[in-house]
């Protein structure tokens, strides 16, 4: 099992913001339905680039500021299901995703 990633997803018109907390990262999606694919795309690129550069994924990434942790703590758990036919993350990170409404 890989590293656990805490992620809070929230709306900032017109985007859905996908905010990882420890380590901190941010990516966006146009719709809530696009969030799983955006997370998977981000992780696929990160892991491929890390492998290419021979560095640990998320090496040097800091933790998110406390205000985002508070948002995460208040948010509802949300199970992210990756689109059919998408690549499996294998031994990649375990996602603990929450949706802030």
Image: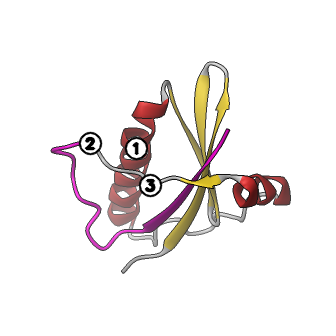
Q: Earlier in the sequence, mark 1 or mark 2?
A: 1
Q: Which mark is residue 79?
A: 3
Q: Which mark is residue 90?
A: none
Residue under numbered circle 2? 83
- Give the colour scheme shown: secondary structure
Discs 2/3, front: 3
Vertical comparison of 62 with 30: above or below: below
Q: How many marks?
A: 3
Q: Residue furthest top?
A: 14
Q: Nearer the viewer, residue 68 or 75?
A: 75
Vertical comparison of 32 with 61: above or below: above
Q: Which x, y percent locates residue 58?
A: 53, 65
91 inside magenta stretch: yes
Query: Which class describes the residues within 10 Å of circle 3: few (<14), some (14-19), or many (20+)?
Result: few
Secondary structure of residue under mark 3? loop
Lateral position of residue 54 relative to residue 8, left or right: left
Q: CA distance from mark 2 to mark 3?
A: 13 Å
Q: Quadrant of the C terminus?
A: top right
Q: Are marks 3 and 1 in contact (CB under 8 Å)?
A: no
Query: Which class describes the residues within 10 Å of circle 1: few (<14), some (14-19), or many (20+)?
Result: some
Please tell me whether the stretch drawn in magenta is mainly helix, strand or loop: loop
7 inside magenta stretch: no
Q: CA distance from mark 3 to mark 1?
A: 9 Å
Q: Which x, y percent locates residue 25?
A: 61, 52
Residue extent of the magenta highlight = 83-101
Residue under numbered circle 1? 36
Lateral position of residue 5 relative to residue 43, left or right: right
Q: Quadrant of the N terminus?
A: bottom left
Discs 3/1, front: 3
Q: Residue at x 40, y 44 (%)?
A: 36
Q: Which x, y percent locates residue 79?
A: 44, 55
């Amino acid at each position: 099992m890989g590293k656990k990633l805490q992620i809070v997803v929230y709306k900032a018109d017109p985007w859905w913001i996908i905010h990882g907390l420890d380590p901190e990262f941010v990516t966006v999606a146009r719709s809530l339905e696009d969030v799983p694919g955006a997370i998977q795309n981000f992780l696929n690129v990160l892991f491929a680039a890390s492998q290419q550069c021979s560095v640990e994924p998320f090496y040097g990434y800091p933790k998110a500021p406390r205000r985002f942790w508070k948002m995460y703590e208040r948010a509802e758990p949300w199970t992210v299901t990756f689109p059919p036919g998408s690549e499996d993350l294998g031994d990649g990170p375990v996602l603990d995703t929450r949706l802030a409404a």
